């Protein structure tokens, strides 16, 4: 009897990272017009952003179908394994719902579904915690309790280069986006309680770096967990933000820089930068 750890592709793992951690990752679907791809398998991050920048069709992302989860749960049931499922925020996607439908269909109680209430590298922090605890011999209940405890302390903060994609995704009006872009307005966002919130605005990228740093300074970072610097497609703004942080005396060793994939990238577009960390 083993413990299986399952997540979805919104966690932005590379295939080799999935294999190394011995986890299962169910891919989201990304659709451009009539072309549909499995995130991370048939469509890499760079190719996604190149298509996004072409601007011919605005992409749609959709959660793994209940059937994908069912296959996974039935295999675990047959092997008498436990399953811990850590998924993208239920407020951002129907993935959690798909997993619950599959659990009912599988009629297997040893499946524990966790709504991460976060996305991208925030999910990775939770999944990696579960992997480490499993390696240390923790029980299913101990792992689930720790991940549930930790998830409210995970913070995803980012600055966006443009308002265009928030407007295309219906999160703000096109008029507000046009005015904002003309004023060189850079929104600062966070994922709070599972939802994407605008937590600040800045005129120009340099002020955006300082604005996001000011928000980060409001938290005490728990150094027992990794800190990630994140970017979408182009690392330039992420490097600028990291330089601003270091200049202010924030030193991170090692510096972990990771790219954001299609699930969140659809809504924020290229050129975003940010930070993911655990609060003490």
Image (cartoon, helix red, strand yellow):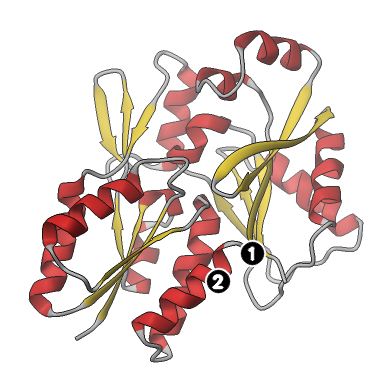
Instruction: Point out residue 101 in the picture as x, y percentages from the top left corner.
Output: 21, 50
Q: How crowded is mark 2: few (under 14 residues within 10 Å), some or many (20 or more)?
A: few
| Mark 2, residue position | 149
Q: How far apart are marks 1 and 2 (CA)?
A: 8 Å
Q: What element carries label 1?
A: loop
Q: Using the rendered view, name the quadrant where residue 181 is placed.
A: top right
Q: Find residue 246 and report its horizontal and vertical position in percent.
A: 85, 59
Q: Nearer the viewer, residue 33 or 84?
A: 84
Q: In which quarter of the image is the C terminus?
A: bottom right
Residue 67: percent from the left, percent from the top? 15, 48
Query: Residue 272, relative to residue 112: is it above or below?
Result: above
How many numbered circles are shown? 2
- 181 and 56: which one is in front? 181
Badge 2 marks a residue whose secondary structure is helix
Q: Where is residue 24 in the image (x, y as percent from the top left)?
A: 28, 63
- Categorize mark 1 by other alpha carbons within 10 Å: few (<14), some (14-19), many (20+): some
Question: Who is closer to the viewer here, 14 or 211?
Answer: 211
Is 15 in front, or is 118? 118
- Drawn side of residue 172 relative to residue 135, left or right: right
Quick check: marks 1 and 2 in contact, CB under 8 Å? yes
Q: Residue at x 25, y 24 (%)?
A: 35
Q: Which mark is residue 271?
A: none
Q: In which quarter of the image is the N terminus?
A: bottom left
Image-based side of 260 in relation to 277, left or right: left
Q: Which residue lies furthest to the bottom in this view?
A: 137
Residue at (82% x, 52% y) in the render: 243
Residue occupying the point 19% across, 54% down? 102
Numbered label attached to residue 153: 1
Question: Which residue is found at the position 48% from the left and 31% from the top?
Answer: 266
Residue 210 seen from this side? yes
């Amino acid at each position: 009897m083993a413990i299986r750890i399952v997540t979805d592709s919104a966690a932005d793992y590379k295939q080799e990272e999935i294999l190394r951690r011995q986890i299962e990752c169910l891919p989201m679907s990304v659709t451009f017009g009539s072309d549909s791809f499995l995130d991370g398998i048939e469509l890499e991050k760079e190719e996604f952003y190149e298509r996004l920048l072409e601007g011919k069709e605005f992409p749609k992302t959709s959660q793994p179908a209940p059937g994908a989860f069912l296959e996974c749960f039935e295999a675990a049931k047959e092997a008498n394994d436990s399953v811990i499922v850590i998924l993208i925020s239920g407020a951002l996607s129907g993935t959690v719902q798909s997993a619950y439908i599959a659990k009912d269909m599988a009629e297997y109680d040893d499946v524990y579904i966790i709504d991460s209430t976060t996305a991208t590298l925030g999910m990775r922090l939770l999944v990696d915690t579960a992997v480490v605890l499993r390696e240390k011999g923790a029980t299913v209940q101990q792992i689930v309790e720790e991940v549930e405890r930790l998830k409210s302390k995970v913070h995803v903060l980012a600055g966006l280069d443009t308002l265009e994609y928030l407007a295309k995704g219906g999160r703000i009006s096109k008029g507000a986006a046009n005015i904002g872009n003309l004023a060189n307005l850079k929104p600062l966002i966070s994922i709070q309680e599972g939802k994407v919130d605008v937590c600040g605005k800045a005129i120009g990228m340099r002020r955006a770096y300082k604005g996001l740093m000011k928000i980060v300074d409001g938290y005490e970072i728990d150094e027992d967990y990794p800190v990630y610097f994140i970017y979408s497609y182009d690392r330039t703004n992420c490097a600028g933000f990291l330089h601003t942080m270091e200049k202010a005396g924030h030193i991170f060793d090692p510096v972990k820089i990771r790219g954001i994939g299609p699930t969140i990238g659809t809504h924020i577009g290229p050129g975003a930068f940010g930070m993911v960390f655990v609060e003490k």
